[in-house]
Amino acid sequence: MKFSMSWLREHLETDAPLDAITDALTDLGLEVDGVEDPAARLGGFTIARVIEAKQHPNADKLRLCRVEAWLNGPEQPSEEVQVVCGAPNARTGLVGVFARPGLHIPGTGVDLKPGVIRGEASNGMLCSERELELSDAHDGIIELPADAPLGARYIDYAGINDPVIEVAITPNRPDALGVAGIARDLAARGLGRLITPPPAPVAGAFPCPVTVTLAPDVADRACPLFVGRLIRGVRNGPSPAWAQRRLRAIGLRPISALVDVTNLLTFDRARPLHVFDAARLRGGLTVRLSRGGETLAALDGKTYAFDDAMTVICDETGPVSIGGVMGGASTGCDETTTEVFVEAAYFDPTRTAATGRALRIVSDARYRFERGIDPASARDGIELATRLILDFCGGEASEVVVAGAVPDTTRVYPLRPERVRSLVGMEIPAEAQVATLTALGFMVAPDGDAFSVTPPSWRPDVRGEADLVEEVARVASLTRLQARPLPVSGPRPALSPALTRTRAVRRRLAAAGLNECVTYSFVAQAEAALFGGGGAAMALENPISSEMSHMRPSPLPALLAAAARNQARGADALALFEVGAAYVGAEPGEQRDVAAGLRAGATAGREWTGARRPVDLWDARADAEAALSACGVTVERLQISRATPGWLHPGRSGALMLGRETLAVFGELHPATLAAMDVKGPAVAFEVYLEAAPTPKARGATRPALNAPALQAVERDFAFVVDARVEAASILRAAQGAEKKLIAAVEVFDVFDGARAAAQLGAGQLGAGRKSVAISVRLQPQDRTLTEDEIEAVGARVVAAVVKATGGALRT
């Protein structure tokens, strides 16, 4: 919404400077997007006189002008400068507009500098209107009357020193889409007195020959009111200069007097109107809903096809205008128009918005109607338009024809003065609250200890006591609001165990070197199918795009997509994780919290130490165990299972189990999964099911005392030859259980199998399909040092337990 300061002062009597007005507008909720001050752009152009103009000695179409100019203001002596000018009207004695060297010429984008043109010095420029962006005229330089004040700024003399303010209007403030509404807000703030001139009724000289009928399908809501009148004997030429300047200032192109009147009132009173060339109408007008297949060639040069739910204005030939959106070209006004029918109606905001979106038409009328204009402004709009048309074009007006009635928008809400303090924390006396609402056009009546407030018809956004409080607070200025803590009653809120667990998992995975991602919960169907999803029950009814058509069964598809994008940009060491929801079904309870992670490429960037290596499934297992440890799970008690989902490599993956409950899965990603997601391997991943992890028992705030053993531990190594299919975990469990009191830890430190065993030990020693697994057993005595016999006895029990559990043998 743009308006000029002179336009604003037609509605607001004020001496406030520009800065005070812009600050107040933003504080009132009408945020200022920008200010165009002509003084900053054209303030350096002054009025000067051509002392002598003669033919350029070296160019037939150029004139050599001696110009009397005031380079330092009219209060300083004038100076004579030479200017080379190509304008045909450059002559001796001409008074025009001079640009001194150093000025920026807005019409050409050139910074003016002294120069030499065809061998003659030129120190400045005599300007045309196009060079000052005042119009498109460029056939000659600007000519001013002989008595124009020499040395004065041209913008002051021409009356174009008028700043233009642009404000951003929120959708709930349709009243502020007119200069009158903005002035009302400023007057309520105290920046001046509201002087919006009321419309002067124009008496009709004859009955209106154009009849208007509201069809039953629009009279109740789509168009409950239609007001119009005929004006005959008009002369549709250019509008007055002041009207053209006003429209150009806000970025509109003057078209003709009749059209310019509608644009002026649209921005002046937020009252869209339309003018029909009455001679081109056939019969009376009917407002109805459109019929499928009807079309209209509109004023924008395009033809639009209607469905059966759009409001149209028709004559006997069919639609001639789209209600609240745009008029038709067949009844548009041009220079031949001599009689015009002026229309002011009220169109339903919802239907207008739907029509504009369906037809893809953006117009100033639609912008206002879909936000809800003042339904009571139709009669005033007709009177204002009639007066301007008679002033601009002459003619004679008919009586006003009215179809329907003004919709009843009356509603009353209570306002308790203390509610302002409880809602916004501001101490505003009741008298000030009443004065504010009254200044904004509300009707306020005492009602016991409270007030009954009736919003005006131009404020459809006010729908309750809270909205009334907002009006009082914004006019009083929310900058006065002081932060006050709310009173705390009852126990202070605390994080739930689930949130505490999620926070701990995030911190642990980040500490492990993974980067957290936050992705959409929607993925493509093909990606969801890779991870067991993609069914019809998980499809979105209105997806953002085809790549986000289904709820994700896991966060991993989005992590893989992120990895693919990073690899395409040269990254070769990726470590990503996300903690979020996975959707296994469409019913309540079929959503679970998952911590998922992905490592691809190498463990680190390239470095000289050689610590970099390709990622493997042990990295994924370590990440999964770290997440479970953050949940309070004792990872030493977990068992390994081969029951893993299909998106993992069947031979290089595992599941971490606690009893029969799967807490996590980890391993290398299946090659088919990597190929489908366009990720280059190696790549490993994990999923931890946070809700499956048992809740740890409550612990006291005090840590237990450190119980460090006083005796030295003893380590013994054992190597077993077992079947190649035997899992190392079964060896570790058997050894750990051989002597629970003394054995503190058991670890695998070497494995021989395949070609490596054949090369170092000989294939005959291990046998076909066999492997060697070496473990280290740590014995920790508690009360005394172990003897050699006791150590040997524990070793024998370890060997016996492993042999019994695996069917293997101690390697000799």
Image: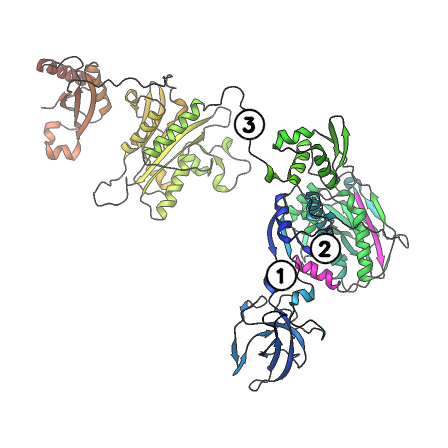
Check contact, mark 3 vs mark 2: CB within 8 A: no
Of the image marks 3 and 2, the number of the one nearer the N terminus: 2
**Residue found 60% across the figure and 82% down from its top:** 63
Q: Marks 2 and 1, how far apart in space? A: 23 Å
Could you tell me which secondary element the residue under label 2 belongs to? helix
- Front position in the image: 78 or 518: 78
Depth order, front residue of 116/72:
72
Residue 617 among those drawn in magenta: no
Q: Mark 2 points at which residue?
A: 263
Depicted 517 relative to depicted 267: above or below: above
Comparing marks 2 and 1, which lies closer to the viewer?
Answer: 1
Look at the numbered discs 3 and 1 and tell me whether their residues touch, using CB distance below 8 Å. no
Relative to 540, 94 lies left or right: right
Instruction: Return the x and y of residue 546 as percentages of the image width and height.
Output: 50, 42
Q: N-terminal of the two: label 3 or label 1?
A: 1
Residue ID for mark 1: 38
Q: Is residue 602 above or below residue 486?
A: below
Q: Which residue matches tag 3?
A: 486
Q: What residue type is labelled 3?
A: Leu
Is residue 370 at all visible to an observer of this figure? no
Q: Position of residue 698 (x, y in %)?
A: 38, 17
Nearest the viewer among 373 and 213 is 373
